[in-house]
Amino acid sequence: MEGALVQRLCSKNIRSLLNLTRNIPSLHCCSRIRVERTLFTRNTTLLTRTLLQSQRIEIRGAASQKKGKNNLAWAGALALTGVCGIVFYVIDSLEQKKKVATIKSHVGSTGRVDIGGKPWTLVDHNGVERTEKDFSGQWVLMYFGFTHCPDVCPEELEKMVQVVDSFNERKDVPNIQPLFITIDPARDTKEVIKKYCQEFSPTLLGLTGTEEQLEDIRKGFRIFFSTGPVDENGDYLIDHTIICYLTRPDGSFADYYPKRVDRKEMIKLIEIQMKRYEKSLENKKA
Ligand code: NI
């Protein structure tokens, strides 16, 4: 009986594990791995618990005669753990391969896009007028969002700030200046942006401006947004492009990083851009 139980649980769990992971390709890369890992743990724990329970019932009944069968149950549990482990390992390594492929295709596909590179004028969160010239000679990461954004903007800014910190702590790579540009100037005043940016990092500089000034820079970086309905408290959400843009010290656009690119990938991709730039400067000199 237990043999059949083990068999049923084995096939059921592996099937459900496979079905579940098949259903989540739309999830963000790193959260998907996390989900798979949780599912794997949850499935094996569930199975082990069921087996332990069935074994206890068996022991209470006719204990010693069933010893062989109990051993069978344990062997089944162990085998399943092994199989689940292999399944998880395969999924994990496929995921890694896909990530490497993403990095390769990403690097290959940028550099020819007509983004940024146009003059702009905005006001920073200290009230100082800023143009693109103020950042010449620096690598810049910029993100367009709004301070009332409940989750995506904070997550993306946190990621961007972590990437910037990892570069600014190192001596073998150039520093990066992070910028936050609001798409919601009506609510995001200088004061609001200043407080918001400082919650992330003292190096994060917030920028705002008139509707026309913001429209200029948004057009340049192809930022799209659409404001949702206003609720009874006057609150509203804004759907918007979720991308971090990297510009080179000469002000030209270097690369972009959508939400799916995680912190580690972003660091690798930026390093590649920095090396390319360095090489192009050396070639110019020669
Ligand atoms: Ni947002």
Image: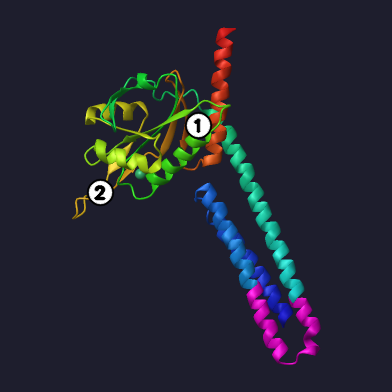
Q: Which residue is painted at 46% across and 29% down in the image?
A: 176
**Percent x, y of residue 99:** 59, 41
Measured as percent of width and height from the top left, residue 129 is found at: 27, 24
Depth check, mark 1 against mark 2: the one in front is 1
- Judge the density around disc 2: few (<14), some (14-19), many (≥20) Cα neighbours within 10 Å: few
User: Disc 2 on helix, strand or loop?
Assistant: loop
Q: Which residue is mark 2?
A: 236
Q: Amino acid at mark 1?
A: Asn
Residue shown at the point (61%, 72%) measured from the top left: 46
**Residue 168: mark in rendering:** 1
Three-letter code for the amino acid on which mark 2 is drawn: Tyr
**Which residue is found at the position 70% from the left and 91% from the top?**
60
Q: Which residues are magenta?
A: 48-73
> Is 57 colored magenta in this rendering?
yes
- Nearer to us in this view, 284 or 196: 196
Is disc 1 in contact with disc 2, using a CB cutoff of under 8 Å? no
Q: Residue 262 got which mark?
A: none
- Percent of width and height locating residue 25: 53, 51
* Of the image marks 1 and 2, the number of the one nearer the N terminus: 1
The quadrant of the rendering that contains the C terminus is top right
Q: Nearer the viewer, residue 182 or 193?
A: 193
- Provide residue 174's location: percent of width, then percent of height: 52, 25
